[in-house]
């Protein structure tokens, strides 16, 4: 055991030493001029266009209270539902920090609040503070995300400014349902993660 | 076998070559369309390139900063000088937790280190969970592309493979059905796995976090179900700050498949309560590549595969013809740094058309590096005598006007008057499929002299 | 000198005759030996445009075949001879993008004397010289045929004679600008606008299988696009495709762009 530990230390030191010796003279860290990437476009429209492109579905609501009725229409057969959105009363299974993720294996639907949406790529940012169990948005059969029009951003540069101050644990951009094109470049929706994604824009 | 020989074998089935070429060109076209939608695409590439150059020039500082921050987040950081040490570290973590079943999402680094056979020899089940990787794993083949591992396989071949290994029904290669069956098969593996390995797309020095990108969700399915997450990264994966992900994530998905971003871009900082997270930082020849001024920029690579999709040679010779973990143009500049002799034919598997350099999201001057490797290879690796002598003689003749004129005349004489069977003999690779130019009555020199005389 | 000429772009073109620029004609070795008609068209075209051209008869080659094969060091004598032959000229003009690119890019192996630096700076591909230095696009040519343009890689991505499909720059093309002004010429649109033809110098023999497959595919694109004549600014690519066309008896002709620009009814 001691042997392994010493070897570990030695590799660390030798790697760092070699890097120091072999690296080129210091080059400056470039500044990002956001002006180059500004575009005057309709964020919601662009977001919806991109979400459709990546295989997701967008539904605009005037009020979040309309959401449950819509979900029932879209997923009439869903019975095992985890809702992490307080405005939705559809949840049939409750989870907490102690829940074993394996027990979520046969969940039909998860409803999660998205923190923000990215117009340029149809992605929604969510963190484990929004869904408690990290496996949830992936293991569920279908996924519903809810996002406010006020949390719509043009592109990733703005987004990283917006999420700069947060408790960093686990977060993920989700852009559309799980998919693959590994068999002859034929796009198939529903690889390992959620088979479908619906985004409610409120 | 040299690339040219492998390529010749691949080209025996012309219909398959056409199919392979079109499949990859389709991806290239999707990439073009997607990049066109981004205002300031070229500026993004400039930024990405400059960021990576800054990283390499301060790599030791960033590595230390990353390690410190990752440790603060409760992550264990390991350092591996080479593939062997990497495999040992991963194995020791698995042993510590008594892991017998493990799932792995795509990681070219673990391919490079040949981790799977190492763990299998130690009685640990390793399941590749990316669909393409699972296909080639079942077929006992290496990936032929870094983003599309099974791009060389026809759907009918996958059909047969799945019948044999997963007990699926014959389906004429229906991708929907086959993917659905793979989902079921792998769902079971995810649920039973005790540890999950992922690669790392980007590691962020100032937060100690890292990002893993997938479309299938296989990395997350593995990691969030297993107790232990081991993330393996080449040391060049670092970027300075989290906001720089804005640059790289805008480029990666679009360059790779034409998607505006991968379906899942997962940001890992702290392990979930009760779980363990490990990061293995691997050198394996990277510090040496860093020392080579002409080839250093190859470490900018973010593994998008765009250079493969655009390369007219890759598209017509297939990834396996390169006989290296990373095939295609980028592989042809990385691999000679690891084993010059073994990979000495790769820098010649190019017309130096430069498409790879212009498509590259981090602006690696790939075709220029291919040219530079050639200069090194002819000196350090024994070359075929004919090639070497012809070129050395050409060097002397062409440096001397008088000799050149005699040589030019006699070559033209030969071409014009030698019998066809001599010219189109087996030794003439040009003449196998192509006619030689028709020789005119004189060369330009003669014409010019004549004209001067008559002025 | 360059700036001076550029300023003069607005003057009547004939005025250029009075600028005594010394232009050296660079005829690459394979064109000299195998395609004298391309050299002749180049010379005649430049003279038609009022440029006084001198052909240094001691010239041989730019050294590219050696450099691309890895024998750059053995080509130093060739490169040095090139510099000796052309050092006296204000401009060096040649009808081959890849050779010109080699001079500009790879003569870094020589000691960078004033002569070497000047030669590298002042060497131009023919179309580039006409378009950018002389500032002309309508050369009074006429060629009533359907033409497909092969954008040779070294001209395109090396010399940046035009925008390439990989980059998101505004579209431009030096050769297209010239061809579009040729009377009767119909420029056809290809499916893959700038894919490599597979010549690649010694690549064409050492990777014979791929090289010929790439050439075949490129030719097919021109046939599918209803092309009668394939043209381009680099005759080595055309030589490769011509070899395939002749072997397979395909209904296509290849002509160097200088021949088209120099043609009239």
Image: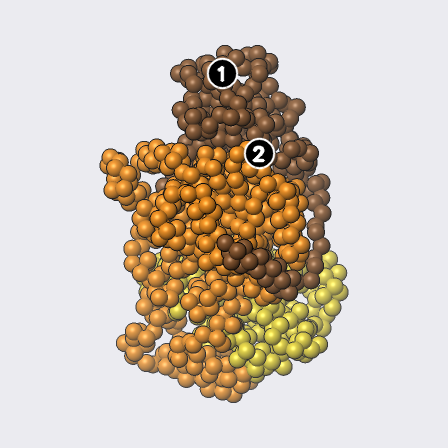
Chain colours: A brown, B orange, C yellow
Q: Nearer the viewer, residue A182 or C243?
A: A182
Residue A78 bears which disc, if any?
none
* Residues at marks 1 and 2 on the same chain: yes
Q: Nearer the viewer, residue B267 or C217?
A: B267
| Residue at position x 74%, y 63% in the image | C3
Rendered-image quadrant of the C terminus of chain A: top right
Tell me the residue that label 1 is attached to. Answer: A91
Q: Nearer the viewer, residue A141 or A82?
A: A82
| Residue at position x 34%, y 35% in the image | B185
Q: Is residue A87 visible?
A: yes
Tell me the residue that label 2 is attached to. Answer: A171
| Circle 2 chain | A
Mark 1 → mark 2, Cα distance in angstroms: 23 Å
Secondary structure of the residue carrying tag 1 is loop
| Vertical position of residue C115 compared to residue B276: above or below | below
Secondary structure of the residue carrying tag 2 is strand
| Residue at position x 49%, y 44% in the image | B230
Is B80 placed left or right of C5 in the picture?
A: left
Q: How many marks?
A: 2
Q: Earlier in the sequence, mark 1 or mark 2?
A: 1
- Are circles 1 and 2 on residues that touch, CB within 8 Å? no
| Residue at position x 49%, y 14% in the image | A90
- Residue B153 in percent (x, y) is at 33, 47
Q: Nearer the viewer, residue A38 or A113?
A: A113
| Vertical position of residue B102 compared to residue A140: above or below | below
């Amino acid at each position: 055991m001691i042997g392994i530990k010493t070897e570990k230390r030695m590799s660390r030191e030798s790697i760092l030493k070699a890097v120091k010796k072999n690296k080129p003279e210091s080059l400056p860290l470039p500044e990002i001029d956001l002006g180059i990437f500004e575009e005057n476009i309709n964020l919601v429209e662009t977001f919806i266009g991109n979400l459709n492109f990546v295989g997701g579905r967008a539904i605009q609501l005037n009020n979040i209270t309309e959401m449950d009725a819509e979900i029932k229409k879209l997923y009439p057969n869903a019975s095992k539902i985890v809702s992490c959105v307080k405005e939705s009363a559809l949840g049939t299974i409750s989870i907490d920090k102690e829940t074993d993720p394996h027990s979520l294996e046969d969940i039909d639907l998860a409803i999660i609040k998205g923190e923000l949406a990215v117009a340029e790529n149809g992605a929604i940012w969510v963190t484990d503070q929004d869904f408690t169990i990290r496996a949830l948005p992936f293991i569920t059969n279908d996924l519903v995300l809810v996002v406010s029009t006020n949390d719509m951003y043009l592109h990733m540069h703005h987004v990283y400014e917006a999420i700069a101050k947060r408790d960093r644990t686990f977060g993920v951009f989700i852009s559309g349902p799980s998919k693959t094109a590994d068999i002859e470049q034929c796009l198939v929706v529903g690889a390992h993660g959620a088979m479908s994604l619906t985004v409610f824009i409120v | 076998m040299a690339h040219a020989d492998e390529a010749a074998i691949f080209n025996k089935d012309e219909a398959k070559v056409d199919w392979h070429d079109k499949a990859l060109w389709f991806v290239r076209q999707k990439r073009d369309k997607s990049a066109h939608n981004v205002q300031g695409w070229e500026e993004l590439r400039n930024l990405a390139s400059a960021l990576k150059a800054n990283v390499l020039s301060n790599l030791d500082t960033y590595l230390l900063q990353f390690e410190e921050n990752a440790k603060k987040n409760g992550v264990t950081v390991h350092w591996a000088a080479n593939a062997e040490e990497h495999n040992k570290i991963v194995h020791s973590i698995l042993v510590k937790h008594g892991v017998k079943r493990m799932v792995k999402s795509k990681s070219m680094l673990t391919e490079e280190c040949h981790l799977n056979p190492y763990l299998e020899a130690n009685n640990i089940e390793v399941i590749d969970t990316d669909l393409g990787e699972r296909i080639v794993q079942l077929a006992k083949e290496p990936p032929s592309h870094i983003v599309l591992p099974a791009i060389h396989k026809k759907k009918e071949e996958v059909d047969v493979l799945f019948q044999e290994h997963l007990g699926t029904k014959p389906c004429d290669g229906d991708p929907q059905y086959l993917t659905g069956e793979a989902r079921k098969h792998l769902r079971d593996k995810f649920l039973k796995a005790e540890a999950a390995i992922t690669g790392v797309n980007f590691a962020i020095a100032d937060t100690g976090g890292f990002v893993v990108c997938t479309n299938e969700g296989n990395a997350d399915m593995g990691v969030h179900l297993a107790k232990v997450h081991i993330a393996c990264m080449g040391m060049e994966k670092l970027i300075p700050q989290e906001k720089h992900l804005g640059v790289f994530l805008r480029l990666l998905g679009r360059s790779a498949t034409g998607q505006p971003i991968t379906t899942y871009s997962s940001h890992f900082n702290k392990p979930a309560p009760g779980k363990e997270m490990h990061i293995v930082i691997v050198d394996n020849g990277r510090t040496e590549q860093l020392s080579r001024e002409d080839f250093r920029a190859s470490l900018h690579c973010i593994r998008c595969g765009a250079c493969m999709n655009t390369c007219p040679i890759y598209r017509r010779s297939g990834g396996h013809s390169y006989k290296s973990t990373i095939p295609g143009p980028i592989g042809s500049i990385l691999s000679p740094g690891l084993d010059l002799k073994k990979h000495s034919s790769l820098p010649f598997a190019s017309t130096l058309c430069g498409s790879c350099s212009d498509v590259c999201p981090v602006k690696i001057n790939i075709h220029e590096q291919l040219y530079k490797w050639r200069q090194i290879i002819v000196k350090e690796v024994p070359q075929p005598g004919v090639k070497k002598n012809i070129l050395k003689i050409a060097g002397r003749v062409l440096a001397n006007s008088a000799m050149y004129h005699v040589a030019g005349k006699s070559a033209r004489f030969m071409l014009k008057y030698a019998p066809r069977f001599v010219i189109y003999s087996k030794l003439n690779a040009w003449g196998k499929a192509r006619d030689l130019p028709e020789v005119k009555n004189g060369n330009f020199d003669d014409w010019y002299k004549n004209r001067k005389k008559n002025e | 000198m360059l700036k001076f000429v550029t300023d003069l772009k607005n003057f009547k073109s004939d005025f250029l005759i009075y600028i005594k620029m010394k232009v050296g004609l660079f005829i690459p070795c394979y064109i000299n030996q195998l395609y004298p008609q391309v050299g002749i068209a180049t010379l005649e075209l430049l003279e038609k445009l009022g440029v006084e051209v001198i052909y240094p008869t001691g010239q041989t080659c730019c050294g590219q075949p050696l450099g691309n094969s890895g024998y750059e060091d053995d080509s130093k004598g060739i490169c040095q001879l090139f510099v000796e032959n052309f050092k006296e000229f204000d401009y060096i003009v040649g009808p081959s993008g890849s050779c010109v690119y080699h001079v500009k890019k790879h003569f870094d192996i020589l000691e960078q004397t004033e002569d070497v630096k000047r030669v590298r700076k002042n060497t131009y591909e023919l179309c580039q010289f006409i378009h950018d230095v002389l500032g002309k696009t309508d050369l009074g040519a006429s060629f009533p045929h359907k033409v497909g343009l092969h954008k040779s890689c070294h001209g395109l991505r090396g010399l940046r004679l035009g925008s390439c499909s990989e980059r998101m720059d505004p579209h431009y093309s030096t050769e297209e600008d010239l061809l579009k002004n040729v009377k009767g010429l119909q420029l056809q649109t290809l499916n893959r606008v700038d894919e490599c033809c597979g010549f690649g110098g010694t690549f064409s023999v050492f990777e014979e299988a791929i090289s010929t497959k790439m050439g075949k595919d490129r030719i097919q694109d021109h046939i599918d696009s209803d092309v009668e004549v394939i043209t381009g600014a680099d005759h080595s690519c055309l030589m490769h495709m011509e070899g395939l066309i002749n072997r397979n008896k395909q209904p296509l002709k290849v002509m160097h762009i200088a021949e088209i620009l120099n043609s009239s009814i």
